[in-house]
């Protein structure tokens, strides 16, 4: 596995297929099945395949807003928008500058469009190989 810190602006999430969104401790892990695009100058831009699974990690999350639009396969439309907001106060470090991140993609189960607005200490990409 090759883990790279930073380079958030070199990611294009809009076509990605997301398998699982989970918290492990204070970290938010987004497991991506496929279709995440990575652009230069990210060090793995020439090694990552569009169809390869990977994950992104947001360390020491302070805030999460998740919007989910459920996809109805019968009608082919997005319906039932749901919003979830969670603020965290545990483990916050007063001398740390937190950054804002936003990602979106198609969640596979339940099926729908998900948008995550995150405030966290750091961002990492894990290509799950090497």
Image: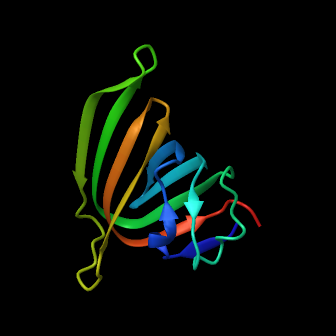
**Residue, far top:** 74
In percent of the image, x 68 and y 63: which residue is there? 48
User: Residue 106: x percent and y percent?
Assistant: 47, 40
Q: In this view, does 99 lie to the left or right of 49?
A: left
In percent of the image, x 49 and y 31: which residue is there? 109
Q: Is residue 38 left or right of residue 70?
A: right
Up the image or down, 123 lies above or below 72; here it is below
User: Residue 112: x percent and y percent?
Assistant: 41, 33
In percent of the image, x 39 and y 38: which residue is there? 113
**Residue, far right:** 130
Depth check: give the residue in front, 75 or 54.
Answer: 75
User: Residue 72: x percent and y percent?
Assistant: 40, 20
Depth check: give the residue in front, 94 or 111.
Answer: 111
User: Residue 51: x percent and y percent?
Assistant: 68, 49
Picture quarter with the C terminus: bottom right
Q: Quadrant of residue 69?
A: top left
Q: How is the image coloured?
A: rainbow
In percent of the image, x 66 and y 72: which residue is there? 44
Up the image or down, 13 lies above or below 121; here it is above
**Residue, far bottom:** 95
Depth check: give the residue in front, 11 or 56.
Answer: 11
Q: Quadrant of residue 81?
A: top left
Picture quarter with the N terminus: bottom right
Looking at the rendered structure, the number of numbered marks drawn on it comes to: 0
């Amino acid at each position: 596995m090759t883990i790279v810190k930073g380079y958030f602006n070199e990611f294009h999430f809009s076509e990605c297929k997301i398998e699982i969104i989970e918290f492990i401790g204070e970290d938010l892990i987004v497991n991506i099945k496929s279709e995440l695009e990575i652009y230069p100058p990210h060090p793995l831009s020439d090694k990552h395949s569009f169809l390869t699974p990977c994950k992104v990690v947001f360390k020491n999350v302070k805030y999460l807003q998740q919007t989910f639009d459920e996809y109805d396969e019968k009608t082919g439309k997005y319906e039932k928008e749901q919003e979830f907001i969670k603020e965290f106060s545990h483990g916050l470090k007063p001398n740390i500058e937190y950054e804002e991140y936003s990602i979106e993609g198609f969640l596979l189960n339940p099926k729908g469009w998900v948008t995550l607005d995150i405030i966290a200490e750091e961002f990492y990409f894990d290509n799950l190989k090497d």
